[in-house]
């Protein structure tokens, strides 16, 4: 009992599946964006906590981070590098 769908029904089904795929991709993208935003917020909170930079401007914070950037990159333990 092999049913054959009319072309229009098959095309509708293809369109529905394509829309579903787009929605799934959009949701995955939103999830990744939210995870990144959360990670950035947590990193910023840690930076403020350990470097006591709450009162510095963004420009001053960037200058501070630039000063220590190369040192941190060069001295990060291998178990923390990915």
Image (cartoon, helix red, strand yellow):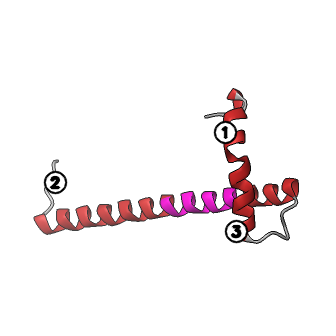
Establish if 39 lies above or below 11. above
Mark 1 to mark 3: distance in Å?
21 Å
Circle on res. 73: 1
Q: Secondary structure at mark 2?
A: loop
Dot 3: within a 10 Å radius of its alpha carbon, few (fewer than 14), some, or many (20 or more) residues? Answer: few
Image location of residue 53, percent across then percent down: 84, 63
Query: Where are the magenta residues, as a range?
Result: 29-40
Mark sitting on residue 59 = 3
Give me the residue at 13% from left, 56% from top.
4
Q: Find numbered disc 3 in the image and state the secondary structure of the residue it sits on.
A: helix
Q: Is residue 70 above or below residue 54?
A: above
Q: Is residue 35 magenta?
A: yes
* Residue 73 x, y percent position in the rendering: 66, 39
Specify few, some or many for label 2: CA neighbours under 10 Å numbering under 14, 14-19, or 20 or more: few
> Dot 1, crowdedness within 10 Å: few (<14), some or many (≥20)?
few
Q: Quadrant of the C terminus?
A: top right
What residue would you read off at disc 2? Answer: 3
Q: Quadrant of residue 9?
A: bottom left
Cα separation between marks 3 and 2: 68 Å
Q: Is residue 24 left or right of residue 53?
A: left
N-terminal of the pair, mark 2 or mark 1, is: 2
Q: Is residue 68 left or right of residue 82?
A: right
Q: On the image, which quarter does residue 54 sit in?
A: bottom right
| Earlier-in-chain disc, 3 versus 2 | 2
Q: Majority secondary structure of the magenta segment?
A: helix
Residue plotted at (70% across, 68% down)? 59
Decide: is 20 above or below 73. Answer: below
**Depth-wise, is mark 2 or mark 1 nearer the camera?**
1
Residue 75 in magenta? no
The single residue placed furthest to the top in the displayed view is 78
């Amino acid at each position: 009992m092999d049913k054959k769908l009319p072309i229009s029904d098959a095309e509708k089904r293809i369109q529905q599946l394509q829309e579903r795929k787009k929605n799934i991709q959009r949701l995955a993208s939103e999830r990744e964006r939210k995870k990144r935003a959360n990670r950035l917020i947590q990193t910023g909170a840690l930076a403020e906590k350990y470097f006591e930079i709450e009162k510095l401007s963004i420009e001053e914070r960037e200058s501070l981070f630039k000063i220590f950037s190369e040192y941190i990159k060069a001295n990060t333990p291998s178990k923390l590098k990915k």
